Amino acid sequence: MHWEPKKGIGPTFIGTCFAYRRQGHFITAAHCLGDLQADQLGVMTPQRALIKSAIALTRHPTADIAIIETPTVHVEGDVVEPFELIVSNWSLGEDFFAFGYPIDVLGPDPDKPTERLFKGHFQRFLDHKSQHLPFHYLAAELSIASPTGLSGGPLFRPAAHTVLLGMATENLTSTTSLESVEKLQRGEEVVEKHSHERVIEYGVALMLSGVSDWIDSHIPPTTTPA
């Protein structure tokens, strides 16, 4: 959330985030934040719409990922359940769940963030250099598109909801020609038949195992006393 209470700005939804390892540490896509600083950000929890103002913000130097830190506030009925583990044994064709708050383009309020669960599979893995954003990271091409607002949302295993695979970031877009352009001569008349194109979008996800060392340095594993 874009959150500047001292200036009377906010809350304005800017993307999805998720807690990792403990309450108060949230991962999101860096491009969602733009040039905003920690004191301009907050995290809104879904249960009671509680806004927690950020106290720290760390951006990855090259990948489209950032970590937002907030105070750990325990409110009855408003518990954030963090993801527990990032894995690297993902595979081609593997199913995933993706969760986030894309805008409600089909409802009465088209700009309202609406919680949705998506299901897809990994189509390929690639060393991704974004064409539109200054980021470079290990990525997966998804069988589903990533709608506006899903960026920053987690991809996790359907049978293990606390196990993270990746994070939604952007789309790869291509067009497919369905018909060719033809020109027909009928006497002195030229009749044209125009081609039609269909836009195809595949979502892109940053694979979190590719930046796990960086995440560990900012959200270290919880140590259990012997």
Image (cartoon, rainbow, N blue to C red):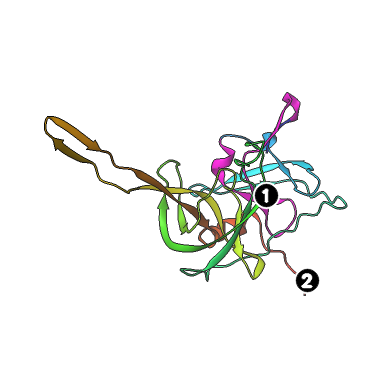
**Residue 85: image location, x then y, percent:** 64, 65
Few, some or many residues within 10 Å of mark 2 (<14, 14–19, 20+):
few
**Residue 140: image location, x then y, percent:** 47, 59
Q: Quadrant of the C terminus?
A: bottom right
Instruction: Indicate left or right for 206 with 16 as reference.
Output: left
**Residue 124: image location, x then y, percent:** 42, 62
Q: Is residue 142 above or below residue 48?
A: below
Segment tinted magenta in the rendering:
5-34
Q: Residue sitting at 48 percent across and 59 percent down?
A: 143
Residue 225: mark in rendering: 2
Few, some or many residues within 10 Å of mark 1 (<14, 14–19, 20+):
some
Number of the front mark, 1 or 2: 1
Indicate yes or no whether the magenta region holds residue 95. no
Looking at this view, is 67 or 120 the one in front?
120
Residue 8 location, quadrant: top right
Q: CA distance from mark 1 to mark 2?
A: 38 Å
Residue 115: mark in rendering: 1
Residue 106: mark in rendering: none
Looking at this view, is 220 or 196 the one in front?
196
Residue 225 location, quadrant: bottom right
Task: Give the amino acid at mark 1.
Answer: Glu
Q: Quadrant of the N terminus?
A: top right
> Circle 1 sits in a helix, a strand or a loop, which is it?
loop
**Total marks in image:** 2
Q: Residue sitting at 14 percent across and 35 percent down?
A: 186
Task: Give the amino acid at mark 2.
Answer: Pro
